[in-house]
Image (cartoon, grey):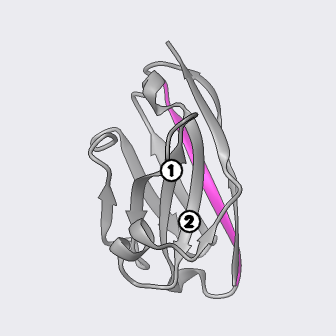
Amino acid sequence: QVQLVESGGGLVQAGGSLRLSCAASGRGFSTYAMGWFRQAPGKEREFVAAINRSGGTVSYADSVKGRFTISRDNAKNTVYLQMNSLKPEDTAVYYCAAARSAQTIVVATTPNYWGQGTQVTVSS
């Protein structure tokens, strides 16, 4: 079992940056693939980014490629999402997710655990 707590959300102007953090408690953080998802008002939750256990493999949704970077620090049990060049359409609640797998595709499609989410609002 792993518990996930997101932080770092807030209000930012278009073109600005934010870094989200997801702190994991419980055992075995380094054995989980990790991911970020988001849900905008009136829309379904969507995949944003994923990273494998070691951090050597990452994947992104097309809508954030080149602007967002996912990373992890296994010594700190934390995964990050650096978001640059933010757009109003990035406004959403951002969720951290974990999967009991080495592969990013698993956390991107069928994560086992979810955080509570953190709000990101981008003003135009």
SS class, disc 1: loop
Q: Is residue 37 magenta?
A: no
Q: Is residue 8 visible?
A: no
Residue type at tag 2: Ala
The residue lying at 67 percent from left, 64 percent from top is 23
Q: Quadrant of residue 98?
A: bottom right
Dominant SS of magenta comes to: strand
- Left or right side of 41 for 105: left
SS class, disc 2: strand
Picture mark count: 2
- Left or right side of 19 for 106: left
Label placed on residue 45: 1
The Cα–Cα distance between marks 1 and 2, rounded to whole angstroms, is 12 Å
Residue 39 screen position, x and y as percent: 54, 44
**Label 1: how many Cα within 10 Å (few below 14, some 14–19, many 20+):** some
Q: Does residue 113 sit above or below 70 in this rendering?
A: below
Label placed on residue 97: 2
Q: Which residues are magenta?
A: 16-26
